[in-house]
Image (tube, coloured by chain):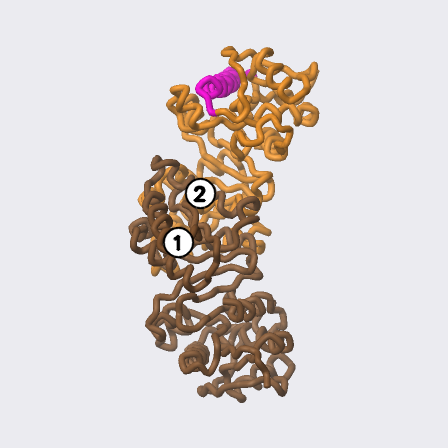
Chain colours: A orange, B brown
């Protein structure tokens, strides 16, 4: 009997590259974990046929209903609905402890909208389903960046910088990662340059001090000058960072590690990781998709 | 008689790494341009002695008064004053057309403050001296990023996004660079995601359309999703970008090209370039400083 952890894999939008990726990676992945693919036999074989191959014998599936005709590269309500149902199955398996974690392939937001699904993406669906305030973290083994604020307009970011908000975020991040050294970025150019270019850094620094005191050890440090944080010298001794807003963290991260990046949802009752790319409709079923991000997502689901 | 262009070189804070860099690079630089160093004989020889070397015979200097004792790594009013006077001399040489451009070595902002100099840095001194609204651009041959807003708090950035402001900026940028393809970044995550995450992209896109129409050709394109703009695939066909704010441009840029980066001031009557690093007081007079950024700054001063 295998002692490998069990991971539910949601297949993402079947009109995109997700199925090709998980099928190509299966031979490698199965030695790391027991993958349980959330797709039914009919859809899996239809997708495999489009890739001129077939599903291997040890390709364990859990049935997700709702057959439809796959159309490579097409945004469709049916495909959106199926990708949501696959994901929902993965969440249910995790909730019932039938699996140890979830890895998700990319969905298409517009397809979800057309299918009448109210969530913008995986993360808010997870928050709702598990009634938990998940932390969104992106990156790879070399560098992870956790986002303090995520999908909000830039003009609203500064007003979210509060002592309570940041303290709570840092405590949750430490509780879930147990990382011993985490850099926290400032908000303003030059981290405010002693208040000349903004003063939110005082709030950030007060929260860092408070959290370190609470934990009884120095885990967090900052506020780091944002445009220094990603330079080679700084990265050399930093494996995890907290960014104050979406592009502060993700623009440098994707500049450095685009193809290897993954997305982790922390602070939920279960671990969930995801590839950090989209459905890539333009190369769907062309046997061109890279499995690097997916393999890293599986490894991270086993690590965190 | 040499046909090489003449560049005035301001020596920066003599308690820092500037003089070491220009002395080490002189042999190479002199084949590209006629450097005119803004420093007097006494100070140059004092600095050279500290580096256990001497100034070469073809080391052309223009006298800047105000002798003081160099103290490696020390923030001092005297050194701050001298670095300003050296820079002022370079600006005057440029104004009188005695040189074709200026290259500046790093000054120390705190030292300027102690010397009672009102400017925060080179750029605002240049704006004042030439009474021109200089554009600040950073980068290297592979990628230049021009900053639409610079040293302002993040909370103030969104209110600077105006049709007139961006149109004017783009027109000036094209006039001075003649670059034929320039990407313009959005302001919000996912460039607003069709207005869901902020709507300043409509203003940016209207300004781009207006400027392209005015120019009679498609120079500018965007608004580009900020965390996609610096990925390898996007960079492969983009040599120049406009960032809406300081860290949006500089965090990814410095993540990618930290040691090669330079700073260019565009839109002044003369070209001015600068290294994109600081005084590095910790390694002053240790013969450890890299000349890469300085060499690139000289080359860029000859290019733009």
| Real-space Cα separation, disc 1 to disc 2, in angstroms | 25 Å
Disc nearest the viewer among 1 and 2 = 1
Tell how many labels: 2
Q: Which residue is mark 2?
A: B225
The residue wearing badge 1 is B216
Image point 70% across, 14% down: which residue? A57
* Residue B35 percent location from the top left of the image: 55, 79
Residue A95 in the magenta stretch? The answer is yes
Q: Chain of mark 2?
A: B
**Can the viewer see residue A157 in this picture?**
no
Residue found at x 50% / y 24%: A74
Tell me if residue B288 can be seen. Answer: yes
Identify the residue shown where x is 60% and y is 39%: A260
Say which of B91 and A97 sits in front. Answer: B91
Q: Nearer the viewer, residue B167 or A196?
A: B167
Q: Secondary structure at mark 1?
A: loop
**What residue appears at the point 38 percent right and 75 percent down from the top-left corner?**
B114
Q: Is residue A223 magenta?
A: no
Label 1 neighbour load within 10 Å: few <14, some 14-19, many 20+: few
Seen as rendered, the residue at the extreme front is B216
Which residue is nearer to you in this view: B276 or B181? Answer: B181
What span is colored magenta in the figure? A75-98
- The quarter of the image holding the C terminus of chain A is top right
Q: Chain of mark 1?
A: B
Report the disc number at residue A170. Answer: none
Disc 2 secondary structure class: loop
Residue A23 appears left or right of B91:
right
**Left or right of residue A73, residue B97 in this image:** left
Query: In terms of secondary structure, what is the magenta stretch mainly?
Result: helix
Q: For the N terminus of chain A, which image quadrant?
A: top right
Judge left or right: residue A295 versus residue B234.
Answer: right
């Amino acid at each position: 009997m295998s002692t490998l952890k069990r991971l539910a894999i949601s297949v993402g939008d079947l009109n995109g590259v997700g199925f090709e990726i998980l099928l190509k990676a299966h031979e490698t992945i199965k030695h790391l974990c027991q993958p349980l693919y959330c797709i039914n036999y009919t859809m899996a074989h239809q997708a495999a046929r489009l890739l001129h191959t077939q599903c291997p014998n040890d390709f364990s599936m859990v049935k997700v209903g709702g057959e439809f005709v796959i159309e490579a590269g097409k945004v469709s309500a049916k495909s959106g609905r199926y990708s949501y149902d696959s994901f929902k199955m993965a969440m249910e398996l995790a909730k019932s402890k039938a699996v140890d974690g979830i890895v998700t392939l990319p969905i298409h937001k517009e397809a979800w909208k057309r299918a009448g699904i109210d969530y913008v993406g995986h993360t808010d669906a997870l928050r709702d389903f598990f009634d938990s305030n998940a932390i969104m973290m992106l990156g790879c083994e070399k560098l992870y960046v956790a986002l303090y604020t995520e999908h909000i307009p830039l003009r609203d970011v500064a007003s979210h910088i509060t002592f309570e908000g940041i303290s709570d975020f840092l405590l949750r991040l430490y509780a879930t990662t147990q990382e011993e050294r985490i850099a926290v970025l400032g908000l303003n150019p030059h981290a405010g340059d002693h208040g000349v270019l903004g003063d939110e850094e005082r709030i950030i620094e007060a929260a860092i001090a408070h959290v370190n005191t609470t934990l009884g050890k120095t885990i967090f440090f900052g506020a780091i000058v944002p445009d220094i944080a990603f330079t080679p010298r700084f990265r050399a001794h930093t494996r995890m960072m907290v960014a104050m807003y979406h592009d502060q963290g993700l623009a440098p991260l994707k500049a450095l590690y685009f193809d290897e990046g993954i997305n982790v949802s922390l602070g939920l009752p279960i671990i969930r990781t995801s590839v950090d790319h989209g459905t890539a409709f333009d190369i769907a079923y062309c046997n061109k998709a890279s499995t690097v991000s997916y393999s890293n997502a599986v490894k991270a689901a086993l690590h965190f």
